[in-house]
Structures are given as C-alpha cells and as structure tokens.
Image (tube, rainbow, N blue to C red):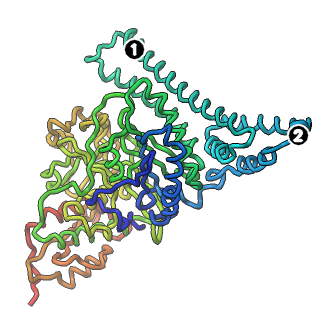
Amino acid sequence: MQLLSKPENLNYKKKREYETFHFFQLALTERNWTGSDYITKEDCAWFINELKEFDDAFNNMFGHVLTKSRFTFLLDTSIFSDEIPENYKSNHKIIDFLEELEDFEDFDEESKEIAKRAKKYLSKLKSFSTKIENMPYIYRWALQYEDHPFSVQIKTIIEEEVKRIGISSRKNWLSDRKKLIETIRKKNLDPYKDKDKISAIDVKIVEGCEKRDKHFVSQILKYSISEPSLFFYGVYFIIQYFKEMDEMMDAGYEFVSFERDGNKVDVFLKDSTNELNELFLAHETFISSLPKVKRRADGWVSAYHTLYDLQGKEFDNEEQTKDVLRTISDWVINRIKDKSKYSLPRKNWLHPVKSELFSSMGINYIYFEDISTIGGPSEEELLIKAHAFMEDGAEILFPLFDPNSWDDLNAVQCALIAYSLCLFHDVAIEQNYEMLQQEARVPGRNSFEYLLVTHSSHTDPTPLQLNNKSNGKSAVTEKNADKESHIKNEHWVSFHFRRLQPGYKASERQRAVASKYGIKKLPTGFTFVDSHVRGEKNNEEEKMRFSALDILNKTLSKLDTYYNLEKTH
C-alpha cells in the first residue's frame, strides 16, 4: 500500500496565510485528508474565486451592521467530493418552493381563492424558515425580492429566530455555570485541593456549549459548499448568533473547520487566537483532532510543532543517511498489505521511545492518534497521524509521509518518520507489543494509562528499565499492574545495515541475501548484515517475524562505525 504523499505546495517551512474577506478569513487545505477522492486545492479554486466575486457586494449589503469578523474557516478539500450525496449539497425542495412564490409577487387580494393560496404559501414559508439550514436560502430570496409581499415579514421572522437561538444558548450556558457553582458549594469542593474535580465538571459544561454552537454553525452552512453566496449569508447569521454570547463575555476568535465524514460534512469549532489560527493552518492534517482550547475558561494550551521544528545532530552524510532510512521505510511499506485493515490498541497509551538518537534530543514518547485510508493521486494511501512528546512539554504533530516526499526534510526528521513507521509495523502488523498499566503524564495533557512497549530480538524491556527512563516532566508514576501481551517469540529475524568506508561497496553476496528479504537495492554507502534466527532454525519467509524497530535502531547505532570487509579495487 502507498503511504501518504505530500503535495508540492505543502511547505511547512513557509508561513501560510488565509484569504481575507470583509467579515471572515478562509483557507482550503492543500489536499484531502479524508475520503476516497483525491482532491487538491487547485481543484477547488472556483470556490475561493466566487467568494471573492461576492465579497464587495456583501460588504455593501451588511457592512452597516457588521464589523470585521473574528471568524476563521479552514475547509478540507474532501468536502467538495462528488461522492457526497446531492441532498447534502443542495435543498431542491426549498429551491422549487421559492420559485413558486414568484406567482404571488403581485396577486389580486380581492380574489378569495388566490388570497387563500397566498396565505397557505406564507404559512409554509414560515414553517421552512424555522429550520436553520433553510435560513440562508430564504433570507437570500427575501433580499432579492424586496417588493414581494412576504419579504419584510419573512426577513423579520428569520432574524428573530436566530436571535432566539442565540439567547437560548446563552441561557443554557449561564444555567450550567450556576449549576457548577451549586455543585462546588454542596460538595464543599476546595478550589485548590479539588481543582481536578472542578475542572472535570467545567469540561462537561464547555462540551455542552460547544455542542450547541457546532449544531448551529453546521446547519446554517450546510448548503453553502455548493453555492458560495450562501456562505456569506451563513456567516452573517453566525455573527448574529455569537453576538448574544458577547453580552456576557469578551468576544474572542472562533476557528471553524470542515472535513468529510463518510457521506456528510463534519464541522469542528475551537476558541482561538491569531497565533492559534496560524498553528491550525500549519497542522491542516489534524484540523479535526487538535485538542480543543477550553471554551470560555482559562487553560494551558499545548505548544504544537511540525517536523520542521525538530532539529538535532547533523549526520556527516545527510543524503546517505536519508537513503538508508528510505530503504528501511520502503521495506516496511512493502509489508503493508493492500485492502488490509490495521488497528491500534484502543487503550489510552504512549510508547516510550527506545532510541539513543531521539532520547538525546529530548523526545520521550510517541503515540498514534489515528490510522485511515484516503484517496491519493494514483491509489489509496495510508494516513497515520503521529504525535511525539518532548521533555520540555512541546508536542510535535506529524503525518507519516511516504519516503518519496522527504526531499525537504533533514535526516533527523526523516529518522523520526522512519521510527514511527517501524513502530506501526511492530504493533499493527507483527502485533509484537505489550501494554503495561503505568500512568504516564505529559505537560498540558490528561495522563495516559498505559505504556506500549515493543520487544526486540535480543532483549525485552522491564518495568524497572522504564522507570529509570523517566524524568521530572514526563514520569511513569505507577508500577506494573496489568499486562496485555501480543508477542511472537520464535523465528525472529533482525538484519540491519552498516556504513562502509569511503571507496568500499557491498558484495554481490550481501546484495543477494538482502534481496531474499525483499530489499531490491541497497542504500549507497551501506552493506547488508544478515540476521540470526531465534527459536527453530527455520527461516521460511512466511514464518519469519521481524522487529522493524530493532532493525532501525541497530542501523542508527552503527552510523558512526564502518564495516570494511568488501573493498572496491
């Protein structure tokens, strides 16, 4: 299976910017991060272009009642997929009904029959207007047909309904806050000693508020993807809705992201700042899953970094090092079967990094947030979302890009992808891991209940060793209490690559041995070191078991030494 490909325009080194409109700012992702259709930003340029065409007109229309908006939108290109059902993109029922209303633009009120029909249509129009997703359609119609006898009345109904929904959300928020205060008083909770308990209650209140806000935003913009003009009307009502919240708190920035979820479009809301908006755009792969900033409550915000923020030891030959990392990664990718479904442990886990290279750089833990398949340029691609936690509390978010997309990465950054890919291999393919119930804490995050450790071909980690790896900021706080094991102990194979002295090359014999493991081409400047087999001396390929992490770590540990048996004459 193909691993995730990186679009040429996705440049993490270059600061990216949103398109700025009068009442909001907006950006499209460089490619789809979900869905089976491969869709690039260029494929959706029509949407941005149409928004630009309408922007001045809407400023003239609403500029006297709206100020510059604090809303930022990031749209995953997957929402423009042709596979999303038509009834989610457009409401033909309301479109046809609004066309019928033209018959009553100028009707004879003296005719009882026509007056009766007009009254029936007005009643039906009022009924349609109470549904949030219909409001942009009907409000647009009312502005386009200002002389229609229904126009003024229906505009007022919609505006009052939006205000009512906003007031209701505000009342629910105030009611929830009041309940929190009553709970603290009844349970006699101390603001300092019981801080975690109070915070847990507060989180539920925040989630309830977010759920109400998300419902309104997702419904008001439901049909706006196929008709950009509807997007402006949706934004107009979103601003009016949030105005009701502004009366009880300082207005902050709101970040709204969209991505495809099966046959529908999902919406995510986050309280934000200008700095966070830039951060979300830099991490567009994670727009649906970045930990949410606590809404309307003070809270510590994690510092998120990309692979490009990771710096470390420079290897004496960067390209050779990247070449061997590509070779190991390609070998792992070739072992990922097409159409196979791979899963991760469902428990809340972290993997303690077993690599001197990364430990020396302050990387303590890695975990995988999600695994999915998405449409790529030529075939389905495997998307693995990974997080790495640093000693200083920083968090690196990175998808595992295919080795063919590594050109603008340095060797250390490639090594982190390779390590994560090897971890995926050992956990999801070989199921060679053990879950130790030991709480691990990282700054700015809830604690993780389990440590996921893998087993090499020559030694198994112990709880004692893991405890010795801990430090003040990322500590293992409980002893081993429970285990979930997935271990295959026989037929272990653990080859690796070793650097050659300048002027040396691998022998034909070593190339032939490597080919038996599926390695068609040895990396420049390296030779292949064959494995030993633990258990029965049977190395039939289908019975072999590999620890990809062991292969990688052995190779990395030998980068500063040379193997000089084969010399070029």
Q: Position of residue 320 (x, y in %)?
A: 17, 73
Q: Position of residue 30 (x, y in %)?
A: 41, 61
Q: Can residue 372 be seen in this view?
A: yes
- What is the count of numbered marks? 2
Q: In which quarter of the image is the C terminus?
A: bottom left
Q: Where is residue 251 in the image (x, y as percent from the top left)?
A: 39, 32
Q: Quadrant of the N terminus?
A: bottom left
User: Mark 2: which secondary structure?
Assistant: helix
> Measuring 18% from the left and 37% from the top, which residue is drawn there?
473
Relative to 121, residue 244 above or below: above
* Residue located beneath label 1 in the image: 181
**Which three-letter amino acid code belongs to the residue tagged 1?**
Ile
- How crowded is the residue under tag 2: few (<14 C-alpha within 10 Å), some, or many (20+)? some
Nearer the camera: disc 1 or disc 2 = 2
Relative to 501, residue 19 above or below: above
**Nearer to me, 464 or 397:** 397
Q: Is residue 543 visible?
A: no
**Which three-letter amino acid code belongs to the residue tagged 2?**
Ile
* Residue located beneath label 2 in the image: 114
**Nearer to me, 254 or 521:** 254
Q: Residue 118 got which mark? A: none
> Measuring 37% from the left and 13% from the top, which residue is drawn there?
184
